[in-house]
Amino acid sequence: MPNHIHLTYYGLTGKQPMRDFKKYTSVHIRKHLKMREEKDFLQRLNAQGNKGRVRVFKLWQSRFDDLVLTDMKTVITKINYIHDNPVRKGLVSRAKDWFYSSANDYLADKPSAISVDKDWQ
């Protein structure tokens, strides 16, 4: 999605997996943006995290919604919701057309932009 992501994950280690995910991705995305000299984008993200006189790179919002998925029916429902989100928002006509979706892995049996482990099925 242009302004947010949906994730399902299993078995992430650590006490705060979302904090660790957000920190890891922020560091690598910032390095990538610097390497590509994306100064305007970096400036917007720095301004977003501006705390008084201290400039803070802020990619992610501080809060997130989490839900523990306890049964297979709920897992499948949530994955289908994630796949259909770009369709509901009018960004594509079919879920598998959204480049960053795992829908290709499930619906078209071809790899998506990010590798997906389907062994849980």
Image (spheres, helix red, strand yellow):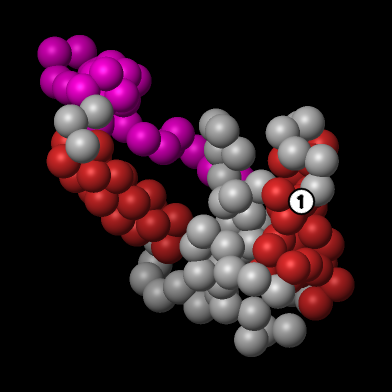
Q: What stretch is highlighted in magenta?
A: 39-65
Q: Which residue occupies the foreground of this view, 121 or 36?
A: 36
Most extreme residue toward the top is 52
Q: Does the magenta run of residues contain 19?
A: no
Q: Does the magenta run of residues contain 47?
A: yes
Please give the residue where the numbered disc 1 appears in the rendered image.
Answer: 95
Locate residue 31, reporting x and y percent. 19, 44
Residue at horizontal 16 percent and vertical 41 percent from the top: 35
In the image: residue 61, left or right of residue 51? right
| Disc 1 crowd, CA 10 A, few/some/many (<14, 14-19, 20+) | many
Quadrant housing residue 109: bottom right
Locate residue 111, reporting x and y percent. 58, 69
Q: Could you tell me what secondary structure mostly forms the magenta stretch?
A: loop
Tag 1, which secondary structure?
Answer: helix
Residue at horizontal 44 percent and vertical 56 percent from the top: 18
In the image: residue 61, left or right of residue 2? left
